[in-house]
Amino acid sequence: MKKFGNIRYKHIGLSSILLTAVTGCQLEASNKVVAEEIIQTTAKTGSFGDQGDGTYINPILNADYPDSDIEQVGDTYYMITSKQHMSPGMPILKSKDMVNWENVGHAFPSLSWAPEYNWDRMNGYSFGVWAGDIAYHEGKWYVYQIDYQHGLMVTTADNIEGPWSEPIMMLPKADVLDDPAVFWDEDTREAYIIVNSGTKQKGANNKIEGNENRIYRMSWDGTKILDEGKLVYTGLGAEAAKIYKKDGYWYIFMAQWTMGDTSTKPGVKNPKNDRKQLVLRSKESIYGPYEVRTVLEKGSEFGDRSASQGGLMQAPDGSWWYMHQLIQNDDIPFQGRPQCLEPVTWVDDWPIIGIDEDNDGIGEPVKRFEKPIKGYPISSPKSDDDFLSAKLGPQWEWNHNPRASHWSLTERPGWLRLKASKVLPQGSQYGPKINEWTNNDGSDGDFWRANNTLSQRIMGITTGTAVAKFDISGIASGQLAGFVRYGGTFNLLGVEGQENGETRLFYMDGMSNKTQGPVITSDTLYVRTSNTRNQATYEYSTDGKSFRAFGPTFTISFGKWTGDRLGFFSWNENEDAGHIDVDWFKYDYDGPKGKLQTVF
């Protein structure tokens, strides 16, 4: 924990973002060369995030970066977000101004603690890495999270960029549900962790409906639980707690499902799944007793999407800020759960998050506001890639742990090679279960059991265009490979190796219906996909200049707790045979982009 003035607390923020900025590229088959006229040396703005004029537009991180937590060390904010079954897990980003963010890496290089996350099972959809907590304590980094199927764990590192330790299990799944948060109290030399235990430890004497949240004492080194825990709060859907200490008060920030009418009382059922942000406050002890208030609710700016679950932070000028996600409510967000940044004002030692637009003492999210820290340029997480590095870029994540022998950045330097494995068989121990944590009815499709699918997040909800160049000369009979968009469902455009040696274009929808296209005689294939809001299309080309549409306009969607993603697939229906090489990937969208990150 860091101490600022009279407060010790966890910094959390979140952010804007974006990608590399190239508008075209010239390439040679074996040697990538730079065309100087294509290099963009200035940042650009868009419909969200940093506007380049001292203001920002929410969501500042308009992509699938849910469940954020942030720790400040020096003048830098470090953020983690969850990503379920994706590997590596728990992305880490950094920022100087709470608005613009760049990649650091991942806290879990692989989901190593359970076999269902491996390429030969792919049975961990929607589980794996959930909401976590990042902390810096006495020179060491800590990341905590609860895998719903396995329990509370922590990984540690001396350097934020790693290497990170193998996870240490701290509490079993029988005791905990989700969402841990830690606090080191320097005044008493006591360490604590709060977790949502759901109803797993609920006794007959607790008549309050909902989740129980417990505080445990923790060893000073942050790796061991020292007691049986103490119940501090029960509420309907109560979770995502964060602990702070300020001006003599203990505060627990917590999200909770509430009513969608004029009532602001916490803990009331709501058929529309409205979710609000609560604050618990106590003068006496970290264990309470606590007063409870609602401090943030959905307002007029983001329609039916609820606003909650995040963390409090402070800027160098002493101003307070809060980062939170927009929840998936009834209108499912095809881009995932984005992050918003809100100003915080304190009234009688209670926070008001955002702007109290209806004068009821509860804040609502802002749409546009002044940046908390001025003077830093627009920057962004990586997106474009030329695959010149021997290490995979931090913008990419695998669908489950990959088969290490079946991908390479070094077999053909400057290219990403994806070798085709035989698709896993159908069965309860393989792939997702139908309709489990998902809005997708095509969960029995081969795509969900094909290993080494590599992808990254889409950005924003207005428009976007991504294009990739492939060498398809290594396609084998029975192999399917190419470009994928997927979240709640998948849509593929690629090529399939035929028994007669031909290579044929195909499109496949989320129910695995395949539409065959023409024979591709070129070794080179370009695939381009564009979306306007949640409607997307595919095009293909063999020269990178003249593109033809193929397949229908399709709907991209949220599912398996994941927003739509862009990436590559390769599998074989018959045997381990064939490969596809990716030369480069470019992505442009209606959002802020930093100066050129990658040249190719």
Image: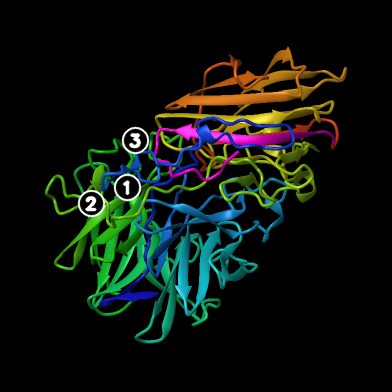
Which one is closest to the eye, mark 2 or mark 3?
3
From this viewpoint, is residue 595 visible? Answer: yes
- Left or right? Give the position of 410 relative to 8: right
Q: Amino acid at mark 2?
A: Gly
Q: Amino acid at mark 3?
A: Ser
Residue 129 drawn in magenta = no
Q: Secondary structure at mark 2?
A: loop
Cα–Cα gap, marks 1 and 2? 10 Å
Q: Quadrant of residue 486?
A: top right
Q: Earlier in the sequence, mark 3 or mark 1?
A: 3
Residue 248 placement (x, y as % from top left): 23, 78
User: Which contiguous range is marked in magenta?
Assistant: 577-600
| Mark nearer the viewer, 1 or 2 | 2
Crowd class of label 1 (few under 14; some 14 to 19; many from 20; radius 10 Å): many
Percent of width and height locating residue 485: 58, 31
**Does the residue at mark 1 contact the one at mark 2 (Cβ under 8 Å)?**
yes
Q: Residue furthest toward the left? A: 359
**Residue 354: image tag:** 2
Answer few, some or many: residues within 10 Å of disc 3's Cα (few below 14, many 20 plus, some between 14 and 19): many
> What is the x, y in percent for residue 490?
59, 30
Is any part of residue 366 visible from this angle?
Answer: no
Tag 1 residue: 307
Please tell me which residue lies in front, 80 or 18. Answer: 18
Seen in the picture, residue 74 relative to 116 is either above or below; the reply is: below
Where 119 sits versus 146, above or below? Answer: above
Quadrant including the N terminus: bottom left
The secondary structure type at the circle numbered 1 is strand
Q: Which residue is mark 3?
A: 47
| Direction from residue 492 to residue 345 in the image, left or right | left
